[in-house]
Every structure is written in C-alpha cells, then in structure tokens.
Image (spheres, grey):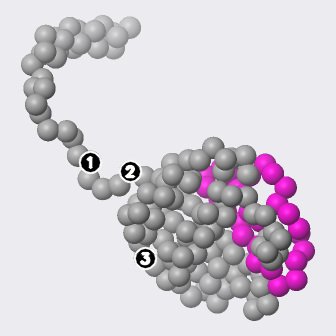
Amino acid sequence: MRAASAAAAVAALLLPLAGCARADAPPVITDGPSPLPAAEVVLEKSGGIAGVKDTVTVRPDGHWTRIDRTGASQEGRLAETDLARLRQLATDPRLATEATETKGPDNCADGFTYRLTVGPAESGYVDCGPAARPPAVTAEVVELLTRATG
C-alpha cells in the first residue's frame, strides 16, 4: 500500500511537467537493430549423398555461427536487409501454423532435411525434389540463411 501511495505522489508531482515537453524535440534513435522475437534462430540441414550435417545459429543481433559435421565453424553477421527480412519471417503467423503441419516424406533418397527452430516453434521439411512442396515461410527462412551464411 505504501508503494502505491509513493507512486501516486510522484505522479502528482510530475504531471504538471508533462506539458513542458517540446513538440519539436528530435525523435529518440535506438542504438542498433531491434532484437529478433526469439532468443535465436536455429537451422539444421542434414542428409544428401555426402551426409551433410550443418547447423546455423543466428543470435538476435544478427551474428551467426555455422558448424558442419566435422565441427568446423564459421561466423559472420547478417546484412541489415537480411536481418530485417529474417525478423519479418520470424514473426509471420504462418510460421507457427507450419510448425503444426505434416512435414512431407520421412524418407527420401539423397534428400536434405531442414529443421528450423524459432523460439518455441519448430518446423521443417524434407527437400525431395521438384515435386516437394515445403512450407512457404520455413522454406524462405531456409533459403535466406543458406544464402546469407554460405
């Protein structure tokens, strides 16, 4: 109860000052890009004739790490346009829907399996040739991260 009284007293003291704000004041500019909605985005790619097993992890600030099946790693930072697009895709409501859908064939000779994790949502698909119809948003994130992290 005492904290509520103190808050009310502070509000009463500051209320007259609210009209003193300048209308021509410059906007507040934040330092750097806003974070991804999830702590990180993780893409796992496995399969293929060579037995690929790559994992790309993108942190909220756009820094990424790619680790291959041998444990070798590469690091980089997404370009601002790629990071902006990743943020859009990561918050696309279709992504959550895709996480609940059937993922397609479980076994495909020499196909790649993609598993995407964005926060609690996990989606994925098996790329089983031209007839495969991967989930749209998941496939776009896969393409973006594959291209951007090389």
Q: In x, y percent, where is residue 120?
A: 66, 50
> Magenta segment: does it hold 103?
yes
Cα separation between marks 3 and 2: 18 Å
> Magenta segment: does it hold 122?
yes
- Who's the residue at 56% across and 53% down the image? 90
Residues packed near mark 2 inside 10 Å, few (<14), some (14 to 19) or many (20 plus): few
| Residue 38 seen anywhere in this rendered image of the structure | no
| Earlier sequence position, callout 3 versus callout 2 | 2
Q: Amino acid at mark 2?
A: Ser
Q: Amino acid at mark 1?
A: Thr
- Magenta residues, as a range? 99-125
- Who's the residue at 59% across and 47% down the image? 92
Numbered badge on residue 30:
1
Quarter of the image that includes the N terminus: top left
- Who's the residue at 38% across and 51% down the image? 34
**Is 74 left, or right, of 122 in this rendering?**
left
Cα separation between marks 2 and 1: 8 Å
Residues packed near mark 3 inside 10 Å, few (<14), some (14 to 19) or many (20 plus): few
| Residue 36 seen anywhere in this rendered image of the structure | yes
Question: Pointer 3: what residue?
Answer: 76
